[in-house]
């Protein structure tokens, strides 16, 4: 990486990526989960990471967040090494995530969940940001005073994304937002992600098993197998690759 | 009308209830046949002899049968149906009056010394109840809000009490100076406990806090030269009314205000003192819940990993919860010391921790009014049934089990949202209580 530390002044194509993962190896005890992953996310992009169960997708996402930490390699955000930072400090750099399994606060109201999302944001923005999230997900508006745990799965996913958005993220990490949702809801949520990206230039890193939908949405994609990136390229390329089609797309587009 | 009610009566599943009753009776028989059914006594020659007690055993088994039978009968749907048989007007009145219950309780609490002025016994009991209400509210911050199960809360109560006693005796400091100092010291110990248990949760945390409570007590017993050991500390200074002592002397409280001297003045003063301390605890707890730190506590209770990924510093959040909870324990402790005038390690056993925790759990974790009601019911109950002290634990256990069966979320299982947009909407119980499964 021979780029100057201040990358914002560089011309667009030569710009350093917003997030850059280099040679990251992560272990759970002695078990290898990631075997040296390289990956870039540029500003304004939607990048997706697809792969089967247990490939290490979620581990990569959590490694970016410092929990578990990478044993080798580096994670750079805006050129800054965040590999060894504690999770809450990483979050303060305005990297937000809607984690796997949503992890919303079940006994707190929807509004309180959203307020917690804004923990690191300037409170001056809260009212306007809240309004934007509620416009994006009108269902949340109806349920504002209901407990998070009483929402349906799709509503919980909306809440998880909304909560992440209230942190005013520079980079949004989404871990399987389509998990366990009806096709109609998946489309709604993916449409919302696209809208955020197009209108607000939000950078999104999307981990998905639903390869077809994810590649349709994303600009670029990576394919992970067994803790390694085996393929990468533009979404269109990947969609047409026979190995991708065979492994992830054939047998029903769900 | 009567037969209408009759027709709505649910069909009781008597067979299932009988089965459950028989099973309970069998278990009770197995349990008690040796425990109760046989009693060892010293015989005429000095040797132990076995005295069979068939009737005691019989009645216990019958009680187990009836209890289980009735419980099975009114459980679940049938229980709900029975509740529906309460006429609608009554239920409406209850729901309308419920929001004002807290204010009524407060008004009553303020009025207690005026109503029972001459009843010293009742005033003392009320002071004791209020002390536990305050302890309950303090512990509620740790357990109810932050979800950190603390079985050693009495340690902070002890730290507060000893802080006041030692500061007052060794340096002659007045109650009003010692009170904040005791709170600060207790908070400091709270942080000290917090550090080693940062990574622990649930049962593991509970065990360590339990040990912490015992350590404090054992130190108090064994550090004779400092704490007086098992003899405790006596002759602790009584609080004064802003410098006016409650004595019959000319510069005493009664003489200054031209009143006839009465020992009850001090009791009434102590009553209002603990009432104010308790209300301050309550106000702070409620206020904190609406601030980001209170929200962070609750979020910590729900999901620690999610908390961290939202940028919340879980270390600080836990430590502040421990510190603030401990601080109120310390305040209550120094009040206890000044009220009793004598403290010893015996007042700070695990039983006290368990009692305060029981008050919090029975009251409904996170519910302020529930804690107050639970404290009054439990301590009042202890007093009411003083003659049956032998059976106290039995009744206590029974009450616990019943609450866990019928009101698993505590007496007051609702939780008002701490924030609202335009109006405070009453969140119905269905939305608030935990789902099943």
Image (spheres, coloured by chain):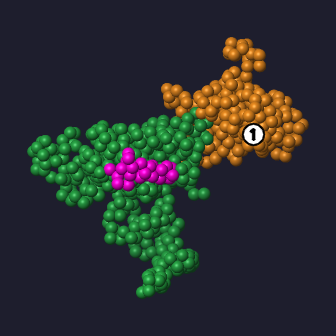
Chain colours: A orange, B green
Q: Which quadrant, please, contains the N terminus of chain B?
A: bottom left
Identified at 68% across, 42% down, the residue is: A100
- Can the viewer see residue B307? yes
Question: Is residue A173 rendered magenta in the image?
Answer: no
Query: As displayed, is residue B221 above or below residue A222?
Result: below
- Would you say residue B217 sits in the magenta stretch? yes
* Residue A136 in view here: no
Residue at the outermost right position: A242
Point 52% across, 79% down: residue: B34
Give percent across and percent down for residue A254: 77, 44
Q: Chain of mark 1?
A: A
Q: Main secondary structure of the magenta part?
A: helix
> Quick one: SS at disc 1?
strand
Q: Is residue A96 above or below residue B358?
A: above
**How would you rate the neighbour count of disc 1 (Cα within 10 Å): few for under 14, some for 14-19, many for 20 or more?**
some
Magenta residues, start to end: B209-233
Residue A184 in the image, given as x and y percentages of width and height: 69, 43
Q: Position of residue B264 (x, y in %)?
A: 19, 53
Residue at 44% x, 69% y: name it. B394
Q: Quadrant of residue A23?
A: top right
In the rendered structure, the answer to whether residue B14 lies left or right of residue B42 reads right
Q: In the figure, residue A104 lies in which quadrant?
A: top right
Q: Nearer the viewer, residue A207 or B157?
A: B157
Kindly identify the residue that appears in the image at 66 percent across and 24 percent down. A201
Q: Quadrant of residue A192?
A: top right
Residue that mark 1 sits on: A27
């Amino acid at each position: 990486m021979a780029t100057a530390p201040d990358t914002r002044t560089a011309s667009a194509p030569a710009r350093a990526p917003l997030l850059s993962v280099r040679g990251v190896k992560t272990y759970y005890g002695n078990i290898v989960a990631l075997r040296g992953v390289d990956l870039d996310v540029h500003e304004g992009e939607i990048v997706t990471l697809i792969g089967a169960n247990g490939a290490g997708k979620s581990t990569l996402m959590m490694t970016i967040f410092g929990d578990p930490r990478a044993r080798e390699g580096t994670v750079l955000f805006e050129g800054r090494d965040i590999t060894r930072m504690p999770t809450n400090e990483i979050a303060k750099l305005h990297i937000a995530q809607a984690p796997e399994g949503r992890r919303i606060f079940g006994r707190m109201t929807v509004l309180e969940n959203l307020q917690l999302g804004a923990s690191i944001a300037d409170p001056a923005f809260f009212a306007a940001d809240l309004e934007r999230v509620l416009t994006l997900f009108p269902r949340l508006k109806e349920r504002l005073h209901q407990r998070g745990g009483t929402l349906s799965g799709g509503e919980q996913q909306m809440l998880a994304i909304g909560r992440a958005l209230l942190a005013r993220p520079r980079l949004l990490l989404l871990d399987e937002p389509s998990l366990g949702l009806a096709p109609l809801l998946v489309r709604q949520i993916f449409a919302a992600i696209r809208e955020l990206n197009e209108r607000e230039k939000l950078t999104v890193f999307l981990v998905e098993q639903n390869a077809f939908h994810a590649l349709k949405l994303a600009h670029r994609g990576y394919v992970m197998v067994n803790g390694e990136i085996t393929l990468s390229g533009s979404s269109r390329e990947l969609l047409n690759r026979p190995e991708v089609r065979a492994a992830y797309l054939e047998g029903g587009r769900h | 009308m009567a037969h209408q009610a009759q027709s709505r009566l649910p069909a009781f599943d008597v067979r299932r209830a009988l089965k459950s009753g028989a099973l309970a009776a069998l278990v009770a028989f197995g349990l008690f046949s040796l425990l109760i059914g046989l009693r060892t006594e010293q015989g005429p020659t000095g040797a132990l002899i076995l005295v069979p007690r068939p009737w005691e055993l019989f009645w216990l088994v019958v009680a187990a049968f009836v209890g289980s039978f009735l419980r099975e009968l009114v459980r679940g749907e049938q229980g709900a149906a029975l509740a529906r048989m309460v006429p609608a007007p009554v239920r409406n009145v209850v729901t309308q009056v419920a929001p004002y219950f807290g204010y009524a309780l407060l008004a009553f609490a303020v009025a207690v010394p005026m109503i029972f002025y001459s009843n010293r016994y009742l005033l003392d009991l009320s002071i004791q109840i209020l002390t536990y209400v305050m302890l309950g509210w303090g512990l509620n911050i740790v357990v109810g809000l932050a979800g950190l199960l603390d079985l050693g809360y009495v340690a902070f109560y002890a730290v507060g009490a000893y802080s006041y006693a030692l500061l007052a005796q060794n340096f002659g400091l007045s109650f009003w100076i010692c009170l904040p100092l005791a709170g600060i010291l207790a908070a400091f110990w709270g942080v000290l406990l917090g550090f080693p248990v940062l990574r622990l949760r649930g049962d593991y945390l509970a065990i360590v806090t339990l040990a912490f409570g015992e350590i404090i007590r054992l130190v108090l017993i064994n550090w004779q030269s400092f704490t007086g050991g098992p003899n405790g500390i006596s002759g602790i200074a009584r609080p004064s009314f802003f410098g006016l002592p409650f004595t019959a002397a000319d510069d005493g409280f009664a003489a200054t205000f031209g009143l006839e001297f009465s020992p009850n003045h001090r009791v009434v003063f102590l009553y209002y003192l603990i009432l104010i301390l308790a209300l301050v605890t309550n106000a702070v707890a409620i206020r904190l819940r609406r601030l980001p730190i209170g929200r962070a506590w609750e979020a910590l209770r729900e999901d620690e990993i999610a908390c961290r990924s939202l940028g919340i510093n879980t270390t600080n959040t836990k430590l502040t919860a421990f510190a603030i909870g401990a601080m109120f324990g310390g305040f209550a402790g120094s009040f206890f010391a000044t009220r009793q005038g004598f403290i010893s390690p015996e007042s700070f056993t695990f039983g006290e921790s368990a009692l305060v925790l029981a008050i919090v759990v029975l009251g409904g974790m996170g519910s302020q009014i529930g804690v107050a009601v639970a404290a009054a019911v439990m301590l009042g109950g202890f007093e009411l049934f003083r003659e049956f002290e032998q059976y106290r634990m039995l009744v206590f256990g029974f009450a616990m089990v019943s609450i866990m069966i019928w009101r698993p979320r505590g007496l007051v299982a609702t939780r008002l949202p701490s924030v609202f947009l335009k109006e405070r909407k009453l969140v119905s119980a269905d939305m608030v209580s935990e789902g099943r499964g």
